[in-house]
Image (cartoon, rainbow, N blue to C red):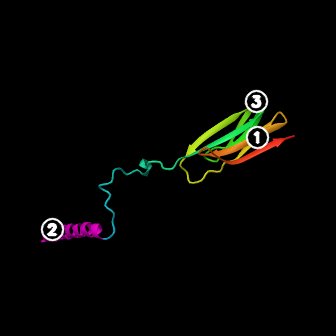
Amino acid sequence: MRSWLVLVTVAVVAVAGFCVYRLHGIFAAPDNRWSSSGFSDDLVSFNPKRITLQVFGAPGAVATINYLDVDAQPQLVDHAERPWSYTMTTTLPAVAANLVAHGNNSSIGCRVLVNGVVKDERRSTK
């Protein structure tokens, strides 16, 4: 007498599971079985930007240079000979480019280039 109760319960669970499986595919459940991979890191980079920081002045003079890298982390270059240049490439939509230079003679300049185009340039003479 109890065996029919177990059989009915198993049948109801099986039918309910099948119905949920079928309805799951109908009502906005994405089917990801055919995607190339499960990682979004496989995206191909597009529109890369090349940012170049330059410090210039009298050849052979030295400078202390502070700048922000592509991850907006402060960096220090001490006693860098001029001319000095640093290039970083990124696909980020925005990058904070910051460059500060202090030199040991009366003339120093710096510039920021994006994809070879000068975006800002400053010069200082004492």
Closer to the chain start, of discs 3 and 2, is 2
Closer to the chain start, of discs 1 and 3, is 3
Compared across the picture, whether 18 is left or right of 37 comes to left
The part of the chain drawn in magenta is 1-26
Q: Is residue 49 above or below residue 63?
A: below
Q: Which mark is residue 61?
A: none
Give the x, y percent position of residue 66: 72, 41
Disc 2 versus disc 1: distance between alpha carbons? 86 Å
Q: Which residue is mark 1?
A: 109
Looking at the rendered structure, the secondary structure element under dot 2 is helix
Q: Which residue is mark 3?
A: 59
Q: Residue at x 73, y 38 (%)?
A: 65
Give the x, y percent position of residue 119: 67, 49
Q: Nearer the viewer, mark 2 or mark 1?
A: 1
Disc 3 versus disc 2: distance between alpha carbons? 91 Å
Looking at the rendered structure, the secondary structure element under dot 1 is strand
Q: Is residue 95 above or below residue 124?
A: below
The amino acid on which the numbered mark 2 sits, given as a three-letter code, is: Leu
Disc 1 versus disc 3: distance between alpha carbons? 12 Å
Compared across the picture, whether 17 is left or right of 92 comes to left
Closer to the chain start, of discs 2 and 1, is 2
Q: Which residue is mark 2?
A: 7
Q: How many marks?
A: 3
